[in-house]
Amino acid sequence: MFEVAELGHKVSKQEYQEQVPDLRVHLLDAQWELSKLDFPVIVLISGVDGAGKGATVGLLNEWLDPRYVRTFAFGKPTDEE
C-alpha cells in the first residue's frame, strides 16, 4: 500500500510536462475506483511552512473530479499538538 520515496530523484521540467497528462488520467482513474468503495478515503497533507502543501492541494483540487472531493484546512497546531 505504501511505497518508499526515492530521495534525490529529480525530473526535468520537460520530462514532468510530458508525464503530466498520463499522471492526471491515472489519478482520475484511481479517484473513480475509490469512489465506488463502501468507505471514505482520507488524504492528509502535512509539512513544515513553505514545503508546498498549498500548491499540492491546489493541484489536486484542479486535477480531481470535484464531485468526489472535499477539502478542509486546519489552523496552526497548538503547543500540545
Image (spheres, grey):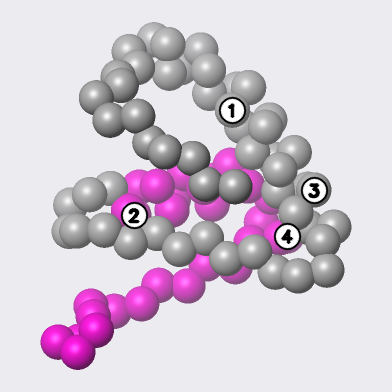
Under mark 2, the amino acid is Gly
Disc on the earlier residue, 2 or 3: 3
Q: Which residue is mark 4?
A: 67
**Residue 15, located in which quarter of the rendered image?**
top left
Mark 4 against mark 1, which lies toward the viewer?
Answer: 1
On screen, residue 17 above or below 74: above
Asked if residue 57 is among those painted magenta in the image, a careful observer would answer yes
Q: Which residue is mark 2?
A: 54
Quarter of the image where one finds residue 36:
bottom right
Task: Report the magenta residues as a range.
Answer: 53-81
Q: Write down the residue under mark 1.
A: 23
Q: Which mark is residue 36?
A: none
Mark 2 or 1: in front is 1
Residue at 68% x, 30% y: name it: 25
Three-letter code for the amino acid on which mark 1 is drawn: Leu
Type of the residue with mark 4: Arg
Say which of marks 2 and 3 sits in front.
3
